[in-house]
Image (cartoon, coloured by chain):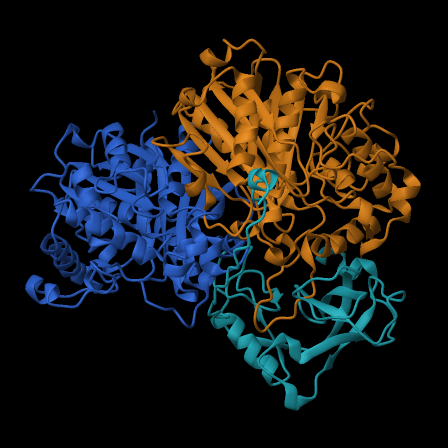
Amino acid sequence: MAERCGIVGIGQTKHDSKRLDVSMVGLVREAALRALEDAELTWKDIDAVVIGKAPDLFEGVMMPELYLADALGGAYKPMLRVHTAGSVGGSTGIVAASLVEAGVHDRVLAVAFEKQSESNAMWALSIAMPFSVATVAGAGGFFAPLIRGYMRRSGAPEDTGIRVAVKDRLNALKNPYAHLHMEDISFDLVAASPMLWDPVRYLETCPSSDGACAMVFASEKLAEQTQTPPAWVHATAMRSEPTMFSGRDQVMPQASLDNAKALYKQAGITNPRKEIDCAEMYVPFSWFEPMWCEGMLFAEPNEGWKMTYEGATALDGDLPVNMSGGVLSSNPIGASGLLRFAEAALQVRGQAGEHQVDGARKALGHAYGGGSQYFSTWIVSSDKP
Amino acid sequence: MSESEERKPVEVLRTPVVLDYTYSAGQSSSRHLRAFGKGKLLGQRCPVDGRVYFPSRGSCPQHGVPIEGEPVELPDRGTIVTYSVNRVPSENIDLELPYAAIQVLLDGADTILFHVLGESSIDDVHMGMRVEAVWKPEEEWDDSVANIRYFRPTGEPDTPFDQYKEHI
Amino acid sequence: MRDVAVVAFTQAKSVRAERDLNETEILIPVIHDIKRGAGLETKDIDFVCSGSSDYLAGQSFAFVSGLDAIGAWPPVSESHVEMDGAWALYEAWVKIQTGHADTALVYGFGKPSMGDLSRTLALQLDPYCVVPLWPDAVSVAALQARLCLEGGVLSEREMAEVAVRDRGKGKSNPYAQVTGDFDVDALLAEPTFVSPLRRHDCSPISDGASAMIIAAGDRARDLAERPAWIRGLEHIVEPQDLGIRDLTTSRSTQIAADRAAVGKDKIDVAEVCGPFTHQSILVERALGLGESVDVNPSGGALSAHPLMAAGLTRIGEASKRIWDGSADRAVAHATSGPCLQQNLVCVLEGA
């Protein structure tokens, strides 16, 4: 029943720890203008704008989309603001695509951003609540015990995470937009970096970035008219589950598995490892690569680490993961999900430059958030669904 | 002002934002916090599967039903299900670094409690370790989880992995 | 477009400051009641979408606790907007239009009593040039009212008449907060609060929550005897800068109303979300409501204004008039941002 939807424009900012050269407006416009340019469109061609970002406390602006509406060409148009924790960038792309799939609009601009340097994200994540004992320091403090759980369950070699960190930083060297460009990255450098939240080392952790990402979605007829062929949306899925309940599998949440099954069913994929050419997944701490390889059913339970270990997830492997350098190399939180989705689209449009996977025709974009409880994913392809 | 200074863009503007909030723990948490004030640990059973939630938030997140009925008193000892050793300073945490942030499964409870480990070298902390609460002196008690200063090892044999693995 | 209807609605009683319950506990019975009332379990609901604000709660990811309240198991297909629940309804309606869902649960919740709402809302303004001045939300609305009064667009008497009308009708609404019989002249004799606004011009600050179930086609007919069919659902945002838009009209409401074809046929009932009396008047005019329209039978936002749920509640209240047959065609409105910056219009019909 859904109309076909094509991605016709993709843009992102240079990601950096502090983009002092631009205001919040300047940051989002940098990404949006690049997406419009890529789509060979102007602001007036856009019917509606969808904005995504993580908690408002990260910039200190309440519902910043109201303030940004004009700058994003949203004046006197419909505008939606999505917020689904860390998966928000992905959800933003899905909501924008659904506006086209629903036949409501012909062209929609999606923009996701974070300008963490304008406030203090770690403070915003760790506000002390009365009557409680704060023991968890930031996202790393929350996820480290889960990673330990995975290590115990899978028996994965202890250097698996180090290998992921090196691979993603090497990929980032091929991506001019990436925040971290570590020419000297090596196994020894990561291994020697300090433990922050044991078992997570400093260099196994994502940076804190300012950045934005934008995409233009178009209905089938309009998408067919673009010079660069569009990336077609084949399937989208979102799943959420509560933060804590008795017997909840925090390491491999049911929401992740259900999400993957729903996504592949919609996309008509029966063997994801074979049928998907590359995957850009939300890996803020290195160990989440093997975990989400399982969570996305590329590997059997407790065997995801083998994909990392055997080089399957490297740029020249059989299922490259995080070709852009991933979240480990750039993390403007609210934009991080859309950046994953955008990288998948860049790959199938053949626009990924030095980090292009040869012949990529079908790609996965993946994001997760909260306490490993929000998941949003999509499959895009160079072929029409 | 020189010409170059005039042309220099304003890059940083400080706007201190101060907002005061009145926080309500809520009925369910209040019950459990008041129990803490008396040195007791109170859990509640989910009416659907009978599992003991500690602390209870008033509804079962899995079944979406209100959790009512008699509270279940729990002992102040349990098992470390998983943990991390934190070496990163955070404004909201008033603990000496490094410390072990632990997830404790109290004996008889079916959900985990976040706390910290004390009286132990951080090299000794491990999954399955048996721990017990060390309370503050009674005169310092408040209606707060912070009445437990930390958990410390009991020296009992470890809990086998199979007995707590479903709580990770 | 698929036919989609509102089939169930519940709300919490709005109160000035809920001391006993936290945000989630306000929501729990609302969600529980709507699911039980409709005879649906989590697994029967194809999509869930909610609206709330982290800044009201003073905490990042405050909306996550909503997942506990709904009993999100097995895992749900779910999304959240940092907007009034009315826009969560919009996202859910779009999802149903894609064909990937037939039923959706929508809710909005907020507990503004936790903080100083008028000051908190200042953080919606331009962070570089306006926020450092900390203009509170009532003062910003008062600037707009002043423009309307000085421009002869409306009068203080008309504003007071809105308060008398809404709070009078609100008496029959058990979920309302500030209701009663008032006299226009007596109200006008009161001193101003933030000039030119008087107390009666301002909606109350309310803690509250509301929830709705919508469904497509036959599923809607299964779930309701007389579904309230959504025949138009449109929303428009304006530039925020108070100096560059005409604050004496609500152009965005007008555009949305045109697109939703409000004027295509007779409207019986209108539920308008006007946080201030002058804003209610501007919206009613932008909607082009005739004399015969029963405006705000629920008492409107002036009787109860649970921020993040208030707009969704207007749509729920309008749906109730369709369900009980007292209206065949209704329009509901939601607003967000300073001086009616963003507006949503929903047209509901009984057939």
Relative to A61, is A90 on the left or the right? Answer: right
> Quick check: can you spot residue B121?
yes
> Residue A150 in the image: x percent, y percent?
79, 49
Residue B151, image x, y percentages: 76, 74
Q: How many marks?
A: 0
Which of these two is toward me, A262 or C270? C270
Left or right placement of residue C314 versus residue A72 in this view? left
Q: Is residue A37 above or below residue C193?
A: above
Q: Nearer the viewer, residue A102 or C30?
A: A102
Outermost residue, front side: B2
Quarter of the image for residue C156 reads bottom left
| Chain C drawing hue | blue
Q: For this view, does A79 lie left or right of residue A265?
A: left
Query: Which residue is located at x 21 percent, y 51 percent?
Result: C145
Quarter location, residue B48: bottom right
Classify A58 as above or below B75. above
Percent position of residue C75, x then y:
56, 45
Say if A123 sits above or below A175 in the image: below
| Residue at 62 percent of width and 52 percent of height | A121
| Extreme residue in the right direction | A188
Task: From the rendered image, report the letter of the chain displayed in cyan.
Answer: B
Any idea which chain is the orange one in this picture?
A: A
Which of the image's four quarters has the C terminus of chain A?
A: top right
Q: Is residue A238 visible?
A: no
Query: Which residue appears at 41% of the width and 57% of the height?
Result: C134
Q: In the rendered image, which quarter contains the N terminus of chain A?
A: top left
Q: Nearer the viewer, residue A110 or C74?
A: A110
Give the percent coordinates (x, y) of residue A190: 87, 44
